[in-house]
Image (cartoon, rainbow, N blue to C red):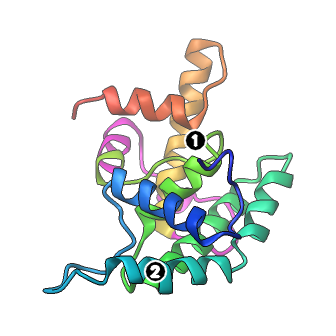
Amino acid sequence: MCRENPDHKADGIIVGKIWLIGRSYGAAVERRPSPDNSDVDSFYECEVAPKIRNSAIDAWFGEIRSDKEDDLSMHLEIHKRVMDLFTAISGVEKRSLASKYLHFHFPERFYIYDSRAQRAISRLTSPVGRKLPPLREHDYDYARFFLRCESLRRQFETQLARSLTPRDLDNIRLSFKP
């Protein structure tokens, strides 16, 4: 769906993408559970779709598409922008949803972040801590995770003598049982 509908112009497409990704991966944009969840549909129609459509998300995605150098700092900055957009919509930090949403639009460039992925990468790699390269505005937790994933990917590429994508690394990482 993301490959065939990469932009954010039609509310139905926006709702479909955010709903499928969020619900399928346990990162829904809905607010925290409340006693009355009957307004979820109107929340998507009246809050989620218009706020995403009226944001600069398509311009951000254009930056990623035009990035031929694979600028990791830019990727991390755009993750932060998407996370901030989803957080503004939901009122709850949406780091995981932002990573998943970006991953499904750009599977070759973004890693899926959630608590399981964080635990696995923490056991498989050393902390980057203060070794973070100079970065633009970014989410510190996702940046540390992303850079650890990049380090592990490079190690596997050397050992396997072939290129790996974030999706390949996710599959390897998911097979790891801590």
Instruction: Indicate the position of residue 70 as horizontal and vertical percent values.
Output: 77, 47
Disc 1: which residue: 150
Q: Quadrant of the C terminus?
A: top left
* Image point (53%, 70%), residue name: 139
Instruction: Indicate the position of residue 99 as horizontal and vertical percent values.
Output: 50, 57
In the image, is residue 137 part of the stretch drawn in magenta? yes
The tag earlier along the polypeptide, 1 or 2, is: 2
Nearer to us of marks 1 and 2 is 2
So how many labels did they put on this image?
2
Between 81 and 104, the one nearer to me in the picture: 104
**Can residue 54 be seen by looking at this rendering?**
yes
* Image point (59%, 62%), residue name: 13
* Image point (68%, 81%), residue name: 55
Residue 15 vertical placement versus 159 (above, below): below
State if disc 2 and disc 1 touch (CB < 8 Å): no
The quarter of the picture where residue 54 lies is bottom right
The quarter of the picture where residue 59 lies is bottom right
Name the secondary structure under disc 2.
helix
Instruction: Indicate the position of residue 102 as horizontal and vertical percent values.
Output: 58, 56
Q: Kindly identify the amino acid type of the residue bearing the numbered disc 2.
A: Thr
Between 119 and 12, the one nearer to me in the picture: 12
Q: Which residues are magenta?
A: 118-139
Instruction: Indicate the position of residue 143 as horizontal and vertical percent values.
Output: 54, 60
**Can residue 138 be seen by looking at this rendering?**
no
Residue 83 vertical placement versus 162 (above, below): below
Residue 117 vertical placement versus 99 (above, below): above
Q: Callout 2: 10 Å neighbours few (<14), some, many (20+)?
A: some
In the image, is residue 143 part of the stretch drawn in magenta? no
Name the secondary structure under disc 1.
helix
Q: Kindly identify the amino acid type of the residue bearing the numbered disc 1.
A: Glu
Cα gap from disc 1 to disc 2, whole angstroms: 26 Å
Disc 2: which residue: 87
